[in-house]
Image (spheres, helix red, strand yellow):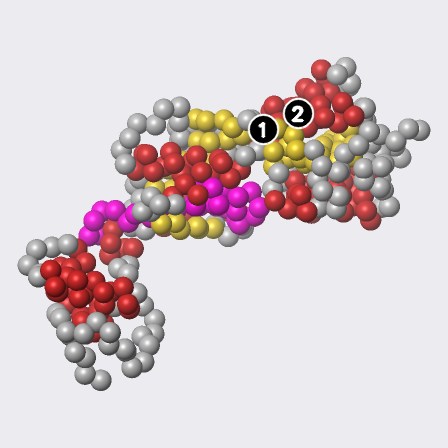
Amino acid sequence: MTLDSSRDDVVVASPLRGRVTMQQVAEEAGVSISTVSKVLNGRYGVSADTVDHVTRVVDRLGYEASLVARSLRNRRTNVIGVLVMDFEPFSTEVLKGVADAIHGSGYELIAYSAGGHVEAHVGWERRSLSRLMGSLVDGAVLVTPTVTDVQADGPVVAVDPHTGPSGLPSVAADNLQGARLGVEHLLALGHTRIGMITGRPDLLSAQQREQGYREALGAAGIRVDETLVRRGDFDTEPAREAARQLLSLPEPPTAVFAANDLSAMVTLEVAAELGMDVPGRLSVVGFDNIPESALADPPLTTVQQPIRRMGEEAAAMLLALISGEDVPDPHRTQETSVVVRASTAPPRAT
């Protein structure tokens, strides 16, 4: 098919397959590859009419320079990365917040998962950053990183770092106060025999949530019964076993505070399997307020950490750092609150 370079309404006989190349743009526009390159890079030596013509062809074919080529040319990709261990509800909400922040900024977003392999629980951040930083992204948001002593060819911001504040700018929730609030809600309903399903013991967030549980009971004059504290690791199957152990005790708790919503929702499932009415015989409180918590049966009372807003704030901080701006207060803590739903009620009178 012969193309008339003076016309922009030419229809390609067969659609181009795969990635559109600069050579294909040149052939379609009837100009040289060097002319296309000059137009794309805003260089001199091309008439206004040719620039307009080539630009319309680029738009029509959907040509986009590769990220690597763009970074080599401009030393900037205009892309930020969100690096996660795995795509679970918490990281997905953070990702939504990052997307909110970059809307209209001219930046694009790459989400990268380490794959969730158990053996990669520690140190996945370094491997992921080495693959992406410098050639594919200008900066990165690390979601719940296990280590923060990372070296990168650009700015990095951590969301809910496992080891707490470090040299990296970070955004986290007030886990200690949130746990206190969740247990105080149960105490206010009249519960005194309150169990807990804890998180991973190596994570600061889990440690703070257990500390908040213990402090709230202590402030109410209630001694912690260690038989009511079971390890759930923030993971479904360990939490399921922990819930089964708690609810199968000769004298089970009348309420359970779980270190995250996934553990709390598993507790609801175990209670249903054992024929325990929620909230009639058992009240359950989670932590996170992931979207799925409102869809649980019954809808879950939980401690809300503003996960999406945490992602948005982390991304805004990252964009400022990429632009070379000073970032005041690089270690930020978001407030938590209790969202009351149908999984909690006063204990049944005996």
Determine if the magenta segment contains residue 95.
Answer: yes
**What amino acid is labelled 2 in the image?**
Leu
Q: Confirm whether residue 171 shows in the render.
A: yes
Q: Where residue 26 sits: x, y (%)?
A: 18, 70
Determine if the magenta segment contains residue 118.
Answer: no
N-terminal-most mark, 2 or 1:
2
Q: Confirm whether residue 201 shows in the render.
A: no
Q: CA distance from mark 2 to mark 1?
A: 8 Å
User: Is 235 drawn above or below residue 349 in the view shown?
Assistant: below
Q: Residue at x 20, y 49 (%)?
A: 74
Rendered image quadrant of residue 66? bottom left
Q: Which numbered tag is attached to residue 114?
A: none
Q: Where residue 101 sits: x, y (%)?
A: 41, 41
| Left or right of residue 6: residue 115 | right
> Crowding at label 2, few (<14), some or many (≥20) Cα neighbours within 10 Å?
many
Q: Where residue 90 sits: x, y (%)?
A: 56, 42
| Left or right of residue 176: residue 166 | left
Q: Residue at x 28, y 49 (%)?
A: 77
Q: Secondary structure at mark 2?
A: helix
Determine which residue is flagged by label 1: 336
| Magenta region, residue range | 72-99
Q: Which quadrant is the N terminus positioned in?
A: bottom left
Q: Residue at x 19, y 83 (%)?
A: 2
Q: Where residue 118 sits: x, y (%)?
A: 56, 48
Q: Which numbered tag is attached to residue 181?
A: 2
> Crowding at label 1, few (<14), some or many (≥20) Cα neighbours within 10 Å?
many
**What amino acid is labelled 1 in the image?**
Thr
Q: Residue at x 46, y 27 (%)?
A: 332
Say if mark 2 contacts mark 1, CB within 8 Å: yes
